[in-house]
Amino acid sequence: MLISTTNALEESLSQPHESTIEVLRQSGGDILLLGAGGKMGTSLATMARRAFDAVGLANRVLAVSRFSDSSATRSLSRSGVETLQGDLFDSCFVNSLPEFDYVIYMVGQKFGTSTAPEATWATNAFIPGIICQKFANSNIASFSTGNVYPLVGIDSRGSKESDALLPMGEYAMSAVARERVLQYFCQSLDIPAVILRLNYSTELRYGVLVDLARRVFCEEPIPLSTGYFNCIWQGDANNMTLRSLTHVSSPPRVLNLTGPETISCRDVCLRFGELMGREVTFLGSEEPTALLSDSAVACQLLGDPLVNINEMIERTAHWVANSGEFLDAPTHFEVRDGKF
């Protein structure tokens, strides 16, 4: 189904699947989202609220962030989500937070690492320890990234959760540090947790597909060195995240959160050209490796994504060709040296 307005998009991204509603009905706990002011936090918090509302539960859903964009707090408030503004570097603020059954940890920094690596390391590797000590009696779902893996052959299914972590660049190294700190505290304090290595979540205002579609629409040459990628519709990623709350363990379970397809950049751009009536040109050729993740385990536990790549392509082409709004947050998925 094509999407033409921002309201319809936000409704789609926050629509809970029936299985998600059932998981939250059975779990019956309150949910705290930390770092909820980013691109994914608003729709995820709203989805949790909608799922509880669907079965008449008054469980709390609290979104915490610095909320530099006030529109996020307004949107969340309209949806019935509680919001609280604060800095997670402030241990006094963290300790003032109430206890919650479930904590979804979304804090992280990626872009700007090359110019201020110390801020990235502090954000990604310091705050998790504070959070684990505060919420030692909670169940935690923490976001991580597929960047913790090395580039792998394009003919593989992608890196598995059990593969060795070989991070490239300071962002990826700090993401491994975030996982290690979480693992240490979750094991020492016996905190049930799940770590979700996400790449790449996409909707119609940002994401790999949007980056490519906008270049095609403007008839800009498409660099092909990173010729393959994974992605997942943000609404599906939200649903799978909420369902993961019942798959926590100590030591933490690790899941690759992405779509099941290995997607060809060339094929996607040619399809965009057809849909938007644009001529497509390319620069270079595909390298034999790319950042790819195998999501088979997550799909088996949490269910397959419902929106497939063809539907994502058609939605994105329609949005771009009809002047939809954008967040102007390029993914830089084509970066191969780990410098962000």
Image (spheres, helix red, strand yellow):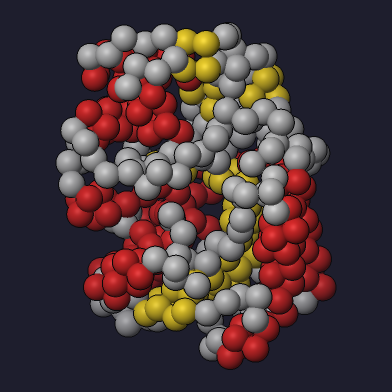
Task: Tell which residue pokes out farthest to the front in this image.
Answer: 115
Query: Height in image: 119 above or below 203?
Result: below
Query: Height in image: 153 above or below 232?
Result: above
Image location (x, y in percent) of residue 134: 67, 82
Image location (x, y in percent) of residue 117: 73, 53
Query: Height in image: 135 above or below 220?
Result: below
Residue that appears at 69% across and 48% down: 115
Number of numbered discs visible in the structure rendering:
0
Q: Is residue 238 in view from this perspective?
A: yes
Please tell me in which quadrant of the rendered image residue 336 appears: top right
Residue that appears at 62% across and 49% down: 112
Q: Is residue 120 left or right of residue 57?
A: right
Image location (x, y in percent) of residue 179: 73, 57
Residue that appears at 52% across and 17% down: 223
Q: Quadrant of the C terminus?
A: top right
Query: Height in image: 338 above or below 57?
Result: above
**In the depicted view, which residue is nearer to us: 220 or 337?**
220
Q: Is residue 10 left or right of residue 283?
A: left
Q: Quadrant of the N terminus?
A: top left
Residue that appears at 37% across and 79% down: 82
**In the depicted view, which residue is nearer to us: 94 or 99?**
94
Q: Is residue 304 in view from this perspective?
A: no
Image location (x, y in percent) of residue 72: 35, 66
